[in-house]
Image (cartoon, grey):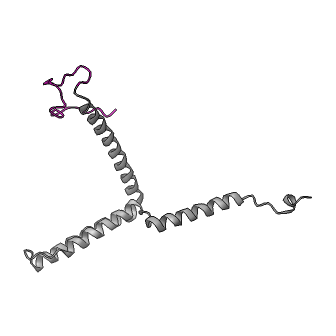
Amino acid sequence: MSDATDRPVDDDAWAKACAEDLEAEKARRRAQHGPPPGSAAEELRKLVDAVADKVSSLQSPLLGAAAQGTVQQIIKQAKSAVEPVIERNPDVFDHIAAAGSELLAAYRSAVEGQERRWTQGAEGPGKKADDPSDPRDEGPAAGEHIDLD
C-alpha cells in the first residue's frame, strides 16, 4: 500500500482551509480599515446619539436655563420615541437603506443620461452651434419630463 491510502482522509480539509483563509482576510481588513459599519439600525442609533450630544453641548447665551432644560427634555423624548422603533424593527432600516441606494442609483442614471444629451458637441446631428432652440443653452425647461427608462 502507498502512503496516500494509509493516511486518514479529511473530507472537509478544503472547506476548513478556505474558512481559515477567509477569517485571516477578514482580520487583515479589520486591522487595515477598522471595523465594518453596523446595520442600518445601529447606524441610526449612533446618529441619534451624536445629534443629541451635539445639541445638548451647544451652550447659547441667548437661551436661558429654562430653555436648556426644555432642549434636554425634547432630546430625551426623541430618543425614547426612536429607541423602541429601532429595537422592534431593525430589519426595516436595512430595507430602507437598500431602497435609498436603489433610488440614488436610478437618479444618478437619469442625470448622467440627461447630462450626456446636454453636453454633446455643438455640431450634433440636426443642431447648429447658433440654434436658439438648442436646450443645451437654456438647461431643462420647466416641467420637462426626464425619461427614466
Is residue 95 or residue 88 the one in the foreground?
95
Q: Most extreme residue toward the left, as rendered?
A: 62
In the rendered image, residue 17 lying in the magenta stretch gets the answer no
Magenta span of residues: 123-149
Is residue 63 or residue 74 the one in the foreground?
63
Regarding residue 146, the answer to whether it shows in the image is: yes
State the image quarter where residue 106 is shown.
Answer: top left
Q: Main secondary structure of the magenta part?
A: loop
Residue at 15%, 74% in the rendered image = 70
Residue at 29%, 34% in the rendered image = 116
Residue at 86%, 58% in the rendered image = 5
Image spot of residue 138 (x, y percent) = 14, 33
Image spot of residue 102 (x, y percent) = 37, 45
Image spot of residue 64 (x, y percent) = 9, 78
147 relative to 2, above or below: above
Q: Most extreme residue toward the bottom, as rendered?
A: 65
Image spot of residue 143 (x, y percent) = 17, 33
Label count reads 0
8 sits to left or right of 140: right
Residue at 39%, 63% in the rendered image = 88
Regarding residue 76, the answer to whether it shows in the image is: no
In the rendered image, residue 141 lying in the magenta stretch gets the answer yes
Could you tell me which quadrant the N terminus lies in? bottom right
Q: Most extreme residue toward the right, as rendered?
A: 1
